[in-house]
Image: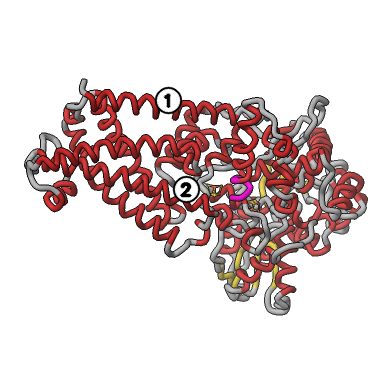
Amino acid sequence: MDLKNIIFIFVFILSVGFFVYSLNKFYEYMTVGLKKDDRFDRVSNRLYRVWKIAFAQTKLLRDPKAGILHLVIFWGFILFLFAVAEAIIQGFYSPFSLQFAGPIFSAITLIQDVFGLLVIIAVLYALYRRFVIHVPRLEVGKSGKFDAAFILILIMMVCVSMFGQNMASLANRGFEIEAWEVRPISLAFAPIFFKSGSGISAVFYEIFWWMHIVVVFVFMNFLPYSKHFHVITSIPNTFFARLDPLRNIIQPLNLEDESVEVFGAVDIEQFSWKQILDGYSCTECGRCTAACPANIVGKTLSPRKIIVDIRKRTVDKAPLIVDRKDDPVLFDKTLVHNYISDKELWQCTTCMACVQECPVMIEHLDSIIDMRRNLVLTESEFPASLNPVFKSIENNFTPWAFNQNDRAQWAEGMNIKTMAQDAEADILFWVGCAGSFDNRYKKVTQAFATLMQKANVNFRILGTEEKCNGDTARRLGNEYLAQMMMKENVEVLNGYGVKKIVTACPHCFHSLGNEYKQFGGNYEVVHHSQFIEQLLSDGKIQLKDEANSSKVTYHDSCYLGRYNGVYDAPRNLLNNAKGVELIEMERNKSRGFCCGAGGGRMFLEDEEGGRINEERTREALSTNADTIASACPFCMTMMTDGVKYFNKQEEVAVKDIAEIILENSK
Ligand code: SF4
Ligand code: SF4
């Protein structure tokens, strides 16, 4: 062992020791979040998803340009770990080489050489995008810029020092390649920088070797204190993200727990360790904010800021909690109000575009809903316009001030039975509040019921026994009211032994199908688009052979599409209808743009920025379609208002897919 090895061992122990210390601190900060959250089930499914999202980077590749760039940097980084491992072992034992691995060594050296160059190009391009052309979603504050530049330069230095080492080593050997070594790029450039066998190349080999080691150790220890900590946390975050294909199934609150002082979350202590991990996993790439409809129309809400604020608050407060220190000013503040304003939280439409786009599987909505729950249930701090909504749900079982006795008025004269009259049915038609009371949407309800009658479907309705499904209250943070509605509905549904439900409302569809299980309601729930598609394919509904031609653009409902993956059924229906030419809007399917009504936004004023429905209607009108098709009562209202705003109601109709199929049926 010579002096070099002794110095290396000293540096190694110092670096690894500090890194372990930082990781341990980080673990302690995560435990500050006290909400229970078990994410250790179905390990093999989780590992498979890590492979798909983290290693194959399928989410990032949705944006091919940036995706390929990131894929190259990521895999280059992984392959460099071999070079790093080799260099570290050489620190303990200088003559060490991976050469003994034979052909595997050939593959490693070749890939390192090629990827080394690609990573240098990718880093230069990333610097160019961030600092020369200023890609908007990458714009961050000063410290964020420093962070990004520093880390990119470190990555480049890892590659440069690796090439330096390889070229100097080749020069030391008279540019002779060793057995199994394949380094075409190093070999091509080495003679440009070094003369064969000169003592200088030996000195430079040592310089580059130390540079490589020092840069790697600096990189490793800088990570836990930078936003690039995601290099370490994003893979665990992907592993621990919810497994359900349907994300954002809201978890119930135990409202009976009398020891609870805060319902929902006002600060990091009320979050789970996973929500804190989300904060540390954010790369600040801005994909979520670039897709956020509220942000796009100029509102303050930015899902990236929400997650970064959770991290900021954790960085500020968690060390004090862990070290049992006091700081009255800091403890006087809370995450909600002082870092994240109430206004931001109320601007969310729960469209889930942010969750869909996030490459590291961050669950923005869980945190937003938790913070809304605190505002409503603990602080009673919510916009005044929600007062009548909550009151109405409680008293009239619908968010609007309608009389529950009128719930089945739409069915008068249609010869439709309720479950109370005759429970011998194949399927229950869950009408929903808009379908029962909204004058425009009652026509959709009637159209769908007529289609079912034409197809001889043996269906029933609940009539006055049906109550609001609870979705609006739940997404607005009023879990108390939501649970009340859900439990009462489950009691009625289970009382009749209901097994299968069809509904035209995606919010009812999501709630009944995915969240009622939490309260003992297990039903097979289908959306009317899927149900009509089945009736068509079974030949129970016949379509006309001739029809007037019509250009139709279909607007995806978030709760049908992103939440439940139903993209094809409505499109298949439209494609089946004679004379219909389906024109897609630019933002469609999983990239569909919200109508602005979800998450209770239907009942809130737009006090800041533009209107989301107008932005979406503008896009729909730009297709020159004469009909905007929707499959959701909220979307229909918002798009109809949008068409009126642009004064296009004479030229453009807004119709539900059930109406279009009924018009086209024999
Ligand atoms: S759910 Fe939609 S509206 Fe809410 S923060 Fe995410 S992208 Fe924005
Ligand atoms: S939350 Fe996800 S999508 Fe948004 S900035 Fe962070 S990493 Fe990017």
Q: 469 or 198, which lies in front?
A: 198
* Residue 452 appears in the figure: yes
Residue at 82% in and 28% down = 256
- Residue 609 shown left or right of residue 128 in the figure: right
Q: Which mark is residue 17?
A: 1
- In terms of sequence position, does the residue under pointer 2 or pointer 1 come before the other? 1
Position of residue 12 relative to residue 546, above or below, is: above
In the rendered image, residue 108, in percent from the top left (x then y), is placed at 23, 37
Any atom of ligand 2 within 8 Å of the CB at mark 1?
no
Residue 174 within the magenta-colored segment of the rendering: no
Q: 245 or 280, which lies in front?
A: 280
Q: Which residues are magenta?
A: 304-308
Q: Amino acid at mark 2?
A: Asp
Position of residue 312 relative to residue 613, above or below, is: above
Q: Amino acid at mark 1?
A: Gly
In the rendered image, residue 544, in percent from the top left (x then y), is placed at 62, 67
Determine which quarter of the picture holds residue 467. Answer: top right
Residue at 69% in and 66% down = 610
As helix, strand or loop, the secondary structure at mark 1 comes to helix
Residue at 73% in and 58% down = 634
Any atom of ligand 2 within 8 Å of the CB at mark 2?
no
Q: 319 or 409, which lies in front?
A: 319
Q: Which residue is mark 2?
A: 147
